[in-house]
């Protein structure tokens, strides 16, 4: 079956993102989808964005009630998926709205789209502004220079991911290492210590790393903390933080490829 299904059944799903700062980073296309939908379900982190969404569509409902500090997040994602799929099956034109990019670390969006497409419904996703897009702007980092590797932090450790330390390294969700619930608070120091020891196999202890948190309010500065790698276990790392490990010096260029750049 094609990845893009127009669908000939009544009912559809369109998944959109609000970006990181809400209204200011939501695309015009996404706003139009929210306004036209018969029912909207959303998961955002900031009350102003929630208020704005309800102004765009009065039939907008939050997913927040599905979360609990003692509940496995995977169960919450399953319930989100079921809610979206069930309303589309009932013939509704549904818009699902998520913080940031709706396809970045949003399991429910991908699952719902896959299920509905397989059943012959129209299901699609619109791109949005994600944390990494804000990161490149806020830290003046160009991923096209030496490349950028991105991993979810727990999965990075769990699978002993191979990576190139001469390229940039972004570790997402470093503030919730090993957490399966919506537990709040700072990351456990012993888990940060384990991550640090893993990184020290590839970087010197004095190598500067960056803790980053994109601002959710227009006009406010992002959180940027630079520190030596060896100090990472003592840092206060909250759930939405991203860890950036800048690249080591590049390797010598391959002579044959270098000659290509010198050809007329």
Image (cartoon, rainbow, N blue to C red):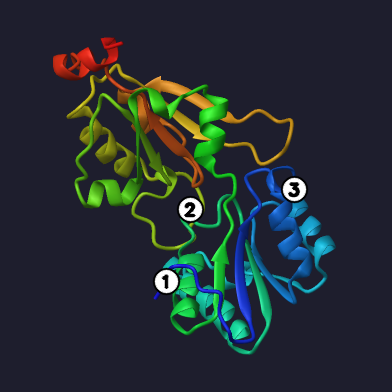
Give the answer, above or below, for where 76 lies relative to 154: below
The C terminus is located in which quarter? top left
Residue 76 seen in this snapshot: no
**Which quadrant of the view contains residue 197?**
top left
Which residue is under mark 3?
23
**Inter-mark Cα distance, 3 to 2:** 18 Å
Quick one: label 2 or label 1, which is nearer the N terminus? 1
Answer yes or no: do the residues labelled 1 and 3 have beta carbons within 8 Å?
no
Quick one: label 1 or label 3, which is nearer the N terminus? 1
Residue ID at (25%, 20%): 205
Give the answer, above or below, for where 65 lies relative to 144: below
Which residue is under mark 2?
104
**Inter-mark Cα distance, 2 to 1:** 22 Å
Image check: 64 left or right of 257?
right
Nearer-the-camera pick, 122 or 129: 122
Image check: 152 left or right of 163?
right
The N terminus is located in which quarter? bottom left
Image check: 95 left or right of 83?
right
- x, y percent for residue 213: 54, 36
Quick one: label 3 or label 2, which is nearer the N terminus? 3
Image check: 226 left or right of 40?
left
Residue ID at (42%, 29%): 143
Q: Secondary structure at mark 1?
A: loop
**Of circles 1 and 3, which is in front?**
1
Nearer-the-camera pick, 42 or 148: 148
Which residue is under mark 1?
2
Q: Secondary structure at mark 2?
A: loop
Residue ID at (80%, 56%): 52
Nearer-the-camera pick, 69 or 171: 171
Residue 128 seen in this snapshot: yes
- x, y percent for residue 246: 36, 24
């Amino acid at each position: 079956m094609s990845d893009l299904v127009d669908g000939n059944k009544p009912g559809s799903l369109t998944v959109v993102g609000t970006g990181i700062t809400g209204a200011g980073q939501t695309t015009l296309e996404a706003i139009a989808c929210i306004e036209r939908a018969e029912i909207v379900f959303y998961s955002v982190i900031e009350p102003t964005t929630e208020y704005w969404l309800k102004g765009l569509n009065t039939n907008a409902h939050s997913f927040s009630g599905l979360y609990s500090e003692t509940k496995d997040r995977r169960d919450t994602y399953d319930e989100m998926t079921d809610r979206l799929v069930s309303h589309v099956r009932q013939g509704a034109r549904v818009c699902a709205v998520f913080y940031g990019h709706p396809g970045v670390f949003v399991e429910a969006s991908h699952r719902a789209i896959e299920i509905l497409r397989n059943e012959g419904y129209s299901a699609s996703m619109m791109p949005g502004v994600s944390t990494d897009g804000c990161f490149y702007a806020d830290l003046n980092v160009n991923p096209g220079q030496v490349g950028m590797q991105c991993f979810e932090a727990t999965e990075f450790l769990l699978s002993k991911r191979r990576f190139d330390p001469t390229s940039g390294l972004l570790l997402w969700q470093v503030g919730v290492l090993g957490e399966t619930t919506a537990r709040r608070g700072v990351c456990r120091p012993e888990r940060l210590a384990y991550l640090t020891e893993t990184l020290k196999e590839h970087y010197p202890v004095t190598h500067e790393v960056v803790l980053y948190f994109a601002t959710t309010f227009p006009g406010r500065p992002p959180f940027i903390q630079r520190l030596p790698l060896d100090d990472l276990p003592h840092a206060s790392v909250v759930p939405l933080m991203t860890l950036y490990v800048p690249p080591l010096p590049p390797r010598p260029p391959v002579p044959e490829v270098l000659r290509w750049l010198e050809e007329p």
